[in-house]
Amino acid sequence: MSAENAPPQAGESKTAKRRFTPKLMIVAGASTVLLLAAAGTAAIWLWPKSPDPAAAKSARMAAKRAAAQASAAALPASAAPAAAVETTASVHDAALAPAAHDPAPAVATDTPAPHGAPAAAAEAPLDRLQRRLGEVLGGKGAIQPSQAGELRVVARSPAVVPVRHADAPAAAADRTAPAGKAERATHWSYSGLGGPQAWGRLKPEFGQCAVGQRQSPIDIRDGITLDLEPVQFEYLPSSFSVIDNGHTVQVNVAPGNAIEVNGKRFALLQFHFHRPSEERVNGRQFEMDVHLVHKDAEGRLAVVAVLLERGAAQPLLQTVWNNLPLEKNEEFAARAQIDLNQLLPADRRYYTYMGSLTTPPCSEGVLWLVMQQPVPMSAQQIDIFSRLYPMNARPIQQAAGRIIKQSN
């Protein structure tokens, strides 16, 4: 029998005996000793590593009832349930032994020791454990059994505030930039968020795509038939290179090719393709078209549009397809030469009007020369381009009362 369970000596009073009640209650069994210490809402259960199952179960049930009664009496009726923070610590047998150098102050209880009661010669091991746990918990808490050789400590507090260390990485939400700032700028395209309906909002310099009054392409109809001066084509066999720029297949031609119209000379820069045709004639849309882009000495642009329809194979187009690059945005220099006269129709009559580029920035002031006679290309040649760009045509724009002329 332990010192805590010995009968009171002659000099002790009944009040001194109650010093451990209901704070400590000992239930002894053949092979099990259960100690219950209740400080406010704190309770301690301790048992040996190999308890008798039946005795241990009976002791735990009795201890739980006593702990529940003590906790209910200590808490006010209006107290709200508090958040629990659970910490598990292994307690070895050595922790129960008294330390020779450790002072043994009295343990504060709700029932003070009677006046004149003799002081204990030395603090009991279990009292020491109770005191240490009370110092660690700091407030009301509970110590619950988990398994042999281990105590599970449950400390209760009104609120749990997570502590973030200064060197800890920021949370994911903190690392997220404000909406719109980290978002990549949308690149223009022919569909989706960067489609033609959004071109004017993507960049300030694309504003003409939304508000311009002389935009291209248009449906060419109700043209005024006139004796127009023929376009003088000065095309020569030339070296070239091909690039897939992500919007179309573009062919860059060596200098020396040009056109002359209305007394002005425009040098050829490049030509590229659209599917289906961007231009329409009296509502009719063609399989494809090719735009030959020229510029004069003052920087003004003139575009010759050749309509392409399904028919016989086109030799110049086949030469271009044979030199398609394997990767986008990588220019491939062809070893062959091309003669752009092969791309022009036999009938050189044309429609003409003032418009704009059909891709951003949609700059206006462009002279358009659309050949009236389409040029044939084979179904296989159409299919080759379609595999790269099934649709890369800007929608039709309003003519907005512009004058359209056509050769008679």
Image: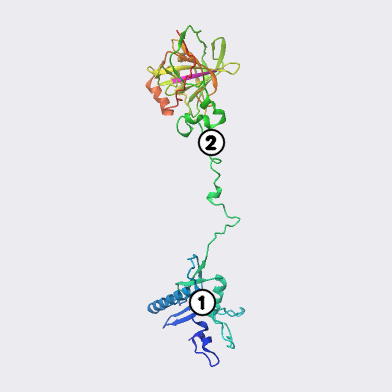
Q: Quadrant of residue 163?
A: bottom right
Which residue occupies 58% across, 84% down? 122
* Residue sitting nearer the eye, 93 or 205: 205
- Spatial CA distance of label 2 from label 1 is 67 Å
Query: Circle 1 sits in a helix, a strand or a loop, which is it?
Result: helix
267 falls in the magenta region = no
Question: Quarter of the image containing the C terminus?
Answer: top left
Residue 91 image offset from top left, x and y in percent: 51, 73
In the picture of the structure, the residue carrying the numbered disc 1 is 93
Q: Is residue 200 left or right of residue 56?
A: right
Res 185 label: 2
* Residue sitting nearer the eye, 16 or 1: 16
Is residue 317 placed above or below 202 in the rendered structure? above
Q: Mark 2 or 1, which is nearer the eye?
A: 2
Tell me which segment is drawn in magenta.
Answer: 289-294
Q: Amino acid at mark 2?
A: Ala
Residue 241 image offset from top left, x and y in percent: 52, 23
Is residue 178 placed above or below 169 in the rendered structure? above
Query: Circle 2 sits in a helix, a strand or a loop, which is it?
Result: loop
Residue 103 image offset from top left, x and y in percent: 61, 79
Q: Amino acid at mark 1?
A: Asp
291 falls in the magenta region = yes
Q: How is the image coloured?
A: rainbow
For the question of whether residue 329 can be seen, the reply is no
